[in-house]
Amino acid sequence: MPKLSDLKKGEQAKIVDVSSQEIPIKLLEMGCLPGNKVRLIQQAPFKGPIYIEINGSYVAIRKETARLIEIELN
């Protein structure tokens, strides 16, 4: 199953699963929930954070956290 960290710049996907206990509650509160659409805006160099859009909100998250979120490509 692809992960959020696998997205390329500009790609969109639907979140399928965020069941890991390591995902911050704040990220879930901001809309990172199954069924919501997500789009990769930009990726920082040198394995830095990724910048995503979820439900009209823009969020930067660590690459390690993005690897815990399963997606379905559109």
Image (cartoon, helix red, strand yellow):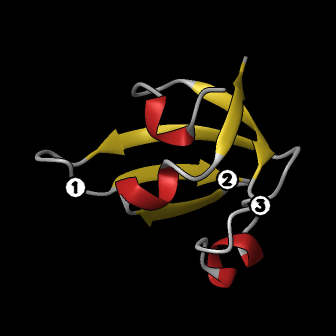
Q: Are marks 3 and 1 in contact (CB under 8 Å)?
A: no
Callout 2, which amino acid? Ile
The C terminus, quarter of image: top right
Residue 36 lies, with reference to residue 13, above or below; the image says below
Residue 66, x across and y down, in percent: 50, 52
Mark 2 crowd level (few <14, some 14–19, many ≥20, 10 Å Cα): some
Above or below, 52 against 9 in this view is below
Q: Amino acid at mark 1?
A: Gly
Q: Which mark is residue 19?
A: 3
Residue shown at the point (43%, 63%) measured from the top left: 61
- Element type at marker 3? loop
The residue that disc 1 covers is: 48
Question: Which comes before the other along the chain, label 3 or label 1?
Answer: 3
In the picture of the structure, the residue carrying the numbered disc 2 is 54
- Label 2 vs label 1: CA separation? 19 Å
Q: Secondary structure at mark 1?
A: loop
Q: Nearer the viewer, mark 3 or mark 1?
A: 3
x then y, percent, for residue 12: 63, 28
Relative placement, left or right, of 35 versus 31 is: right
